[in-house]
Image (spheres, rainbow, N blue to C red):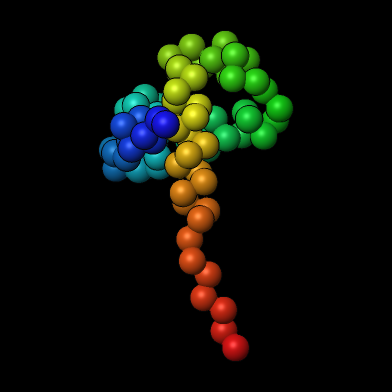
Amino acid sequence: MNDWRKRITFNPEQCGGRPCVRGLRIRVVDVLDLLAAGLSYDEIIEELPDLEKEDIVAVLQYASRKLDHPVIAAC
């Protein structure tokens, strides 16, 4: 399994500190938006040729980890 930590980078001097792919100015949210629009991996790579399929998988893994957090319910 791909380790997203090797592909998703954070730099306060780049893209406002938002998570990006491999230090490129391709934000995680940009890739997620393309996936949400229905583009395939190959179509996304056509749009953003610096990306690799492993980058897209890492974006999804990162998003999954960010959403999988404990929820504390108030009674």
Q: Residue at x 62, y 28 (%)?
A: 34
Question: Number of marks in the image?
Answer: 0
Residue at the (44%, 25%) spot, across then down: 55
For the residue pair 40 and 28, the one nearer the viewer reads as 40
In the rendered image, residue 63, in percent from the top left (x then y), is placed at 50, 44
Q: Quadrant of the C terminus?
A: bottom right
Q: Position of residue 29 (x, y in %)?
A: 52, 37
Does residue 69 lie above or below 11 as drawn? below
Toward the viewer: 74 or 33? 74
Residue 26 quadrant: top left
Give the camera-side residue of 63 and 23: 63
Q: Quarter-wise, where is residue 9 in the image?
A: top left
Q: Is residue 17 above or below residue 32?
A: below
Q: For this view, does 23 lie left or right of residue 69? A: left
Residue at far front of view: 1
Q: Determine if residue 63 is in view.
A: yes
Q: Residue furthest right?
A: 38
Identify the residue shown where x is 67% and y is 23%: 39
On screen, residue 68 above or below 6: below
Q: What's the residue at 40%, 39% (across, down)?
A: 19
Residue 65: x and y in percent read 46, 49
Evaluate whether residue 47 shows in this view. no
Q: Position of residue 1 (x, y in %)?
A: 42, 31
